[in-house]
Amino acid sequence: MPFAYRIDADKRRVLTTGSGTFTYLEAITLIQRMRDDPEFKPSYTELTDLTAVGNIDMTMEQIVELAQIRVFDRESKRAIVAPNPLYFGMARMYESHHEASSGGVARVFSDLSEAVLWLDGTTPPQPGPARPRNSS
């Protein structure tokens, strides 16, 4: 299976990564394995990294179904990293249905470091004030 998860108990986080083709059946299997894992805690945050995914083979209906499955606590943050514009859009669809159906907190990022900052409760660095140009 090209998708797997790792539990980091120190950070209270589940890291899900994958490559190749991501399918609905694979997502359901991953969710079940996670739920059955004695180290899994629904209060942990989750970081899903789709950077190495080559294809997402799911219908819109399947994405909506996945978004409605509750695995984590409502207050638990879930970050999805999707640098590919198509997968970013699909992840945003998941995000909106997840929040609407479960009241959970999910955000989609194109950058891994921004996702980690958000999960850790810090904000990405803000750009400094604009400097006026010299008009001479």
Image: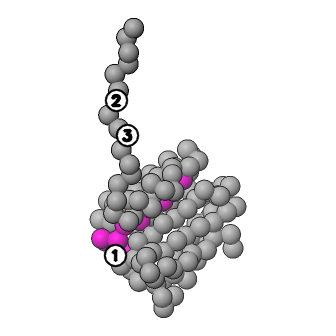
Residue 70 visible in the shown view: no
| Residue identified by numbered label 3 | 127
Front one among 84 and 6: 6
The answer to whether marks 2 and 1 mark residues whose Cβ atoms lie closer than 8 Å is: no
* C-alpha span from label 3 to label 2: 8 Å
Q: Residues within 10 Å of mark 3 (few under 14, many from 20)?
A: few
Left or right: 17 in relation to 67: right
Residue 116 visible in the shown view: yes
Classify 49 as above or below 130: below
Q: Position of residue 108 (x, y in %)?
A: 44, 54
The first of marks 1 and 3 along the sequence is 1
**Which quadrant would the N terminus be assigned to in this image?**
bottom right
Q: Position of residue 72 (x, y in %)?
A: 39, 75
Front one among 78 and 92: 78
* C-alpha span from label 2 to label 1: 41 Å
Kindly identify the residue that appears in the image at 49 percent across and 56 percent down: 113
- Span of residues in magenta: 71-82
Kindly identify the residue that appears in the image at 61 percent across and 74 percent down: 4
| Residue identified by numbered label 2 | 130
Q: Position of residue 42 (x, y in %)?
A: 39, 80
Residue 73 sits inside the magenta stretch: yes
Residue type of the residue flagged with mark 2: Ala
Q: Residue extending furthest top?
A: 136
Q: Which mark is residue 73?
A: 1
Classify 87 as above or below 19: above
